[in-house]
Amino acid sequence: MAEAGFYSVATGTDDLDAAKCFLCGKELDGWEADDDPWAEHKSHAGKCAYVQLGKNENDLLLSEFLSVVKQYMINEIKRLSEVAKEQVDEKAKAVQKKCFGRR
């Protein structure tokens, strides 16, 4: 599974096989013994840059590896900006409620 970009995100007994792509963030669970991680990744997240390369990490050319790193950084910045926006929105609502007594 790791060769296809997945790492474990299991949090308990209900999701022991939960896995997430390090690049696109796609989470999958309910794996069957005969599931092909590459095929599952492609079928659920065909636009993932890592899937589109179709190579194991050790087989990537330097330019391909740097492309993956660049996409990871872009995705992480987007994720962090969404988290920050949610935090600002929550604080803005609290200030508005405090100042004007409404939600």
Image (cartoon, rainbow, N blue to C red):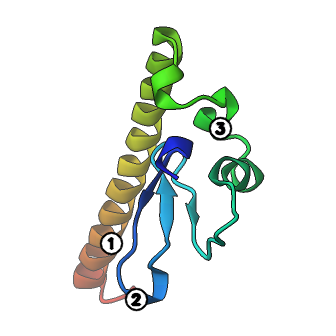
Q: Looking at the rendering, in which quadrant would you find the C terminus?
A: bottom left
Question: Between disc 3 and disc 1, whose residue precedes?
Answer: 3
Viewer-nearest of labels 3 and 1?
3
Circle nearer the N terminus (2, 1): 2
Choose mark 2 or mark 1, whichever is in front.
Answer: 2
Residue neighbourhood size for the residue with mark 1, other residues' Cα within 10 Å, grouped as few (<14), some (14–19), many (≥20) = few
Q: CA distance from mark 2 to mark 1?
A: 32 Å
The x and y percentages for residue 45 are: 69, 50
Label 1 belongs to which residue? 90
Question: Tag 2: residue type?
Answer: Thr
What residue do we see at 46% from left, 20% from top? 65
Nearest the camera: 26 or 33? Answer: 33
Circle on res. 13: 2
Q: Residue at x 69, y 62 (%)?
A: 35
Residue 16 left/right relative to 49:
left
In primary-sequence order, the first of circles 3 and 2 is 2
Q: Residues within 10 Å of mark 2 (few under 14, many from 20)?
A: few
Coordinates of residue 8 in the picture (x, y in percent): 41, 63
Left or right of residue 34, residue 74 in this image: left
The amino acid at mark 1 is Glu
Residue 10 image-quadrant placement: bottom left
Residue 34, above or below 95: above
CA separation in Å, label 3 and label 1: 36 Å
Q: Looking at the picture, how far across and down is residue 13, in whole percent? A: 40, 88
Q: Are marks 2 and 1 in contact (CB under 8 Å)?
A: no
Are the residues at dot 3 and dot 1 in contact (C-beta closer than 8 Å)?
no
* Residue drawn at x 38%, y 40% as measured from the top left: 77
* Relative vertical location of residue 43 with respect to residue 17 in this rendering, above or below: above
Q: Secondary structure at mark 3?
A: helix
Q: Which residue is mark 3?
A: 51
